[in-house]
Image: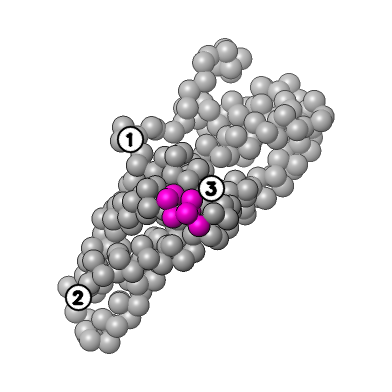
Amino acid sequence: MQEKKKKKRKTTRKRSGKKPYFTQVHQDAISQYCTSPDLKEREYLYVNYIGPVFSEMVDKIVYTYKFTNLPNIDDLKAECKIWLTTILNKFDASKGSKAFSYFSVITKNWFIHKVKTNASRVRKEVYFDDSNNLKEIKGLVTYNTYVGDREKEEFWDNLENKITLWGDEAVKPNEKRVIEAIKILLSEPDAIEIFNKKAIYLYLREITGLNTKQIVNSLNKVRVKYRNFKLEWDN
């Protein structure tokens, strides 16, 4: 394991070959829009940056999750794009959220609600023993790759940054050593031969040189930080 520590760390996330359409430029434009009191500036930001990327985001989510099976989908897409403008001011960049994650989740949930509403209406019109119709209803939402992969990538990027910050903020040496060990394990999952609680503790003991009690004390503090991070992320 000591030799593995010396090896160059490799990322655990697979980078997509596709160029993201929702970039930092759009993130900054949304943040600036939400804080600017100038109506002309906000109009410029929306027309040139926010509106077009919202339109593309909605189209991609509809295609990715197969919401195209919804009736009047073109009308629903237009309705959703208009609705996004009404909640634009609710985005708060100071909480550390990415605009893409925030609005893509909201958009996805908006269409899922439409699916449920439509499915409820359809159920009243079909017999429940008609398997073909039931399959059609269940097939209204088919989870695919891009949005989910992008959300996972942003989650791990944010978590990695948080873990680094926790290490910088840690006062006690033992806590710093445990956090560094966690970073090593997360960056080299292929080097972990056994995934269970006992094995992970053994890995941590080997990397840090600490005993189990010292590791547990530091991990308890990390667990609290992670729970707070996960709660903020989910919200």
Name above or below for residue 204 compared with residue 162: above
Report how far apart the C-alphas of labels 2 and 3 lie in the structure.
47 Å
Q: Position of residue 105 (x, y in %)?
A: 44, 57
The first of marks 1 and 3 along the sequence is: 1
Q: Residue at x 33, y 47 (%)?
A: 145
Residue shown at the point (54%, 54%) measured from the top left: 38
Secondary element at image label 2: helix
Mark 1 touching mark 3, by CB under 8 A?
no
Mark 1 lies on residue = 19
Residue type, label 3? Gln
Range drawn in magenta:
39-45
The amino acid type, in three-letter code, at marker 2 is Asn
Sequence-earlier tag: 2 or 3? 3
Real-space Cα separation, disc 1 to disc 3, in angstroms: 24 Å
Most common SS among magenta residues: helix
Say which mark, if any, is on residue 133.
Answer: 2
Q: Residue at x 63, y 37 (%)?
A: 162
Query: Where is 115 relative to 142, above or below?
Result: below
> 59 and 64: which one is in front?
59
Residue 6 image point, x, y percent: 57, 13
Asked if the magenta segment contains residue 219, the reply would be: no
Above or below, 1 against 46 in this view is above
Q: Nearer the viewer, mark 1 or mark 3?
A: 3
Residue 66 visible to the viewer: yes
Front label number (2 vs 1): 1
